[in-house]
Amino acid sequence: MSKPMHIMFQVANFIYGKESEKYKLLPNDKHILMLFAKHSGPKGIYPSISTLAKELRVSERYVKTRIDYLAGQKLIFIQRINGRKNYYTLCEFSLIGDPQITGELEITGDPQITPPVICRSPHPASVDHPISSISVQSINTERDARAKHARPARKERLPLSESFSPNAENQKRLAEAAQASGKSPGDLLKVFRNIQISKDKLSYDWQAEFENFLINERPALKLSNLATPAASPSNTIPFWGPGHPGWEALHGKRERSV
């Protein structure tokens, strides 16, 4: 069987078409798929990691990482034979031979394009392995399972909304802080709003920001509400002179003796 050149066109149509967008492929991921198509032959696809690294001009570790990603996306199927070589299968493409053309327009066989319903390894030794075929239904099931447990998208940081209102828990904290400070809840909320607007701050969770504001500001609010200590009575006794006990005793004796 001649080398299936048309598989390279199928791979090229796939990686530059809309179908590949959902896989979020990097440029090197697309190059690896094209190299797999380039190295396909009658016995399968089995280029070494070092060969792929040299052709891509990257490290072998990087090549392994991107191949694992392609395998995780079920675009390729990796089969290890005797623990020495890796044989790869392009799961979304056909690996059959090209149509044989014997004349200018005479075609002896129609091109056979297999639908991507079965992912099989073309290597003859694959019959000895129980993982020689994987149904697309099982692949879709695994994709759905990964999507179910996928990490949710990170929230966007937003400025404080003019319609911001504390939730039930923060309403309780606001009432306690207002009682401790002697200020109204509306005044404290206004202070919080002015601080955030002046800083032009963005946040993922403004309820958490308001809770932290009440926790951090509460000691200051308590201090501001403390009554100023009463002034100690001033000492009305002069340092020396009339009114001083010693001075009075001394001059009182003189007046009595006179």
Image: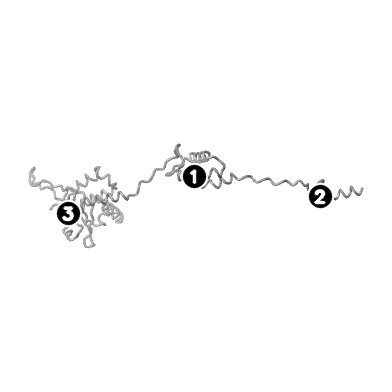
Question: Horizontally, is 243 left or right of 45 in the view?
Answer: right
What crowding class fits label 2: few (fewer than 14 Cα within 10 Å), some (14-19), or many (20 or more)? few
Amino acid type, label 2: Pro
Q: Residue furthest top?
A: 162
**Element carrying mark 3:** loop
- Residue 30 falls left or right of residue 240: left
Q: Is residue 237 left or right of residue 253?
A: left
Q: Position of residue 249 (x, y in %)?
A: 84, 50
From the image, tell me which residue sits under label 3.
Answer: 41
Residue located 54% across and 39% down the image? 184
Reading the chain from its start, which is encountered first: label 1 or label 3?
Answer: 3
Q: Which residue is mark 1?
A: 172
Q: Nearer the viewer, residue 160 or 189?
A: 189
Q: Marks 2/3: CA distance?
A: 121 Å
**Which of marks 3 and 2 precedes in the sequence?**
3
Please tell me whether mark 2 sits on a helix, a strand or a loop: helix
Residue at 10% x, 46% y is 110
Q: Going from the N terminus, do you reach mark 2 or mark 1 first?
A: 1
Residue 245 numbered mark, or none: 2
32 left or right, relative to 239: left
Where residue 43 sits: x, y (%)? 16, 56
